[in-house]
Amino acid sequence: MPIETVRIPRLGAFGSLRLPHPVRRSSPRPILSLLLWGAAGGLGLMACPLDGSASLRPRGVMVDIGGRRLRIVCEGPANAGPTVLFESGAYGFSGDWAWSQRLLTQQGVRSCAYDRAGMGLSDPAPADEPRDGINVARDLEKLLLAAHVPPPYVLAGHSMAGARVHLFANRNPDKVAGLVLVDSTTPEAMSDPQVAKYVLGFTHQTHMAALVSQFGVLKLLASTPLGDKVGLPPEEDQEKRVQFASPGYNRTAYEEVTYWPLAARQAAQTGPLNPDLPVAVVSAGVFDTPEGPRMQALQSPPARASRAGHVEVVAGASHNGLLGKAYAPAIVRGIDFVLNAIGASSPHG
C-alpha cells in the first residue's frame, strides 16, 4: 500500500509556514510572556559565549551520505552484539543521550546517537526532501551504511521519535532486533483528541520560537534552564544552548514538528509492530502538560502487544528530565530488558 506523502512549504527567512489545512491558532500570550521574562533574566545570567560552535569540542564524526553530512556519535566496543541506536525527539540532538550512552559504555554495550539533518551539527536536508517520517528514515539508513554500523539494531526513541522508530523498524525488519520507547508518542496515539490538541499547540509554540529566533531573542534565554531541560554534561550542555538560540535549528525543529502527524500516519501505514519484537516502554512519572496522563496511558500498548514487553513509569522524572543523569538508568534498564529478550550480551543477563 502506498505511504502518504504531503509537501508543506518551509518557513522562509522571515516568513510564516502555511499549514496544509486551516487550524485554530492558540494564543501566543503565554509564550510572549515567557520570552519577555527570560530576556530580562537572561541578560544577567549569560555566562558563556553562545554566538557559534567555535568554542565547542564536538563529539562524534561527520559522515557523508551523498553530498551532505550527518553527525553520528558511537561509543562502546565495536562488535559487542546489537548496537543501540538513539533517535531524539523534537528539538533533540545526539547529545540528549549522553548520560544513557555513558552508562551503556560502562557496561560494554555499543551505542550510537546522531543528529538529524539540520539539527545539531548535521547539514540541512535538500528542499525537496521534507522532514517527514520517510525521508528521516532514509537518511538514517544511508548514515548507518556509510558509517559502517552493522545490524542488528535496538532502536530507542524519545517523544516524537516513537513514530520514527516504528517506521524504521517496519522498513528494516531484518535489521531491527527490538525497540525502547522513552516517553514517546506512538503512531496510534496521534488519533487521540487530547494528543492531537497537544501536538497542535506545540506546533504553534515551535512556530513562534522559529520566528523570534531570527531576531536573537533566544540568545537571551539560552543560558537559563530553558536552554537545557535535560541537564546534560558540560560539553553537550554548551552545544545544546548554542543550538537553542540558532535560527536554523529552530526552523528545522518547526518543520519536523509540522510533519509529526504525517510521520505518524506514515508509520501506521506500515502496519503494527511484529509481536515477536521485544519492546520496552519507559514513561515519565511527572506530567508537564494537562494532556500528560492521557499521553502516558497511550504509551504502553506496544509493549503489551509484544510477546516480550516491559513497562516502567519513572517516578519524579519529567518528559525531558527522563534523559538526565538521575533517570537515565531507567532507560538503560529498558535496553537491558530488550537485550536479554533477544539473547544478547547484557550486564544483567
Image (cartoon, helix red, strand yellow):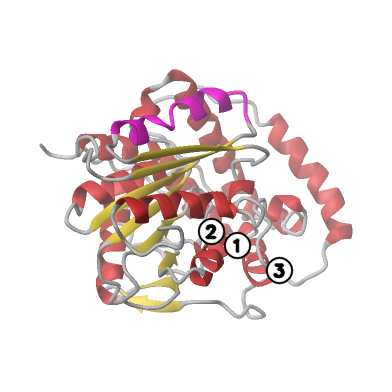
Is the residue marked by circle 1 packed among few (<14), some (14-19), or many (20+) residues within 10 Å?
A: many
| Residue, disc 1 | 243
> For this view, does 148 lie left or right of residue 281?
left
- Residue 132 appearing in the image: no
The residue to which callout 2 is attached is: 249
Q: Disc 2 marks which amino acid?
A: Tyr
**Residue 321 in magenta?**
no
Which quadrant holds the C terminus? bottom left
Sequence-wise, the earlier of marks 1 and 2 is 1
Q: Is residue 134 above or below residue 84?
A: above
Q: CA distance from mark 3 to mark 1?
A: 9 Å
Q: Quadrant of residue 100?
A: bottom right
- What amino acid is found at the position of numbered circle 1 in the picture? Gln
Dominant secondary structure of the residues highlighted in magenta in the image = helix
Left or right side of 235 for 82: left
Give the labeled residue for mark 3: 50
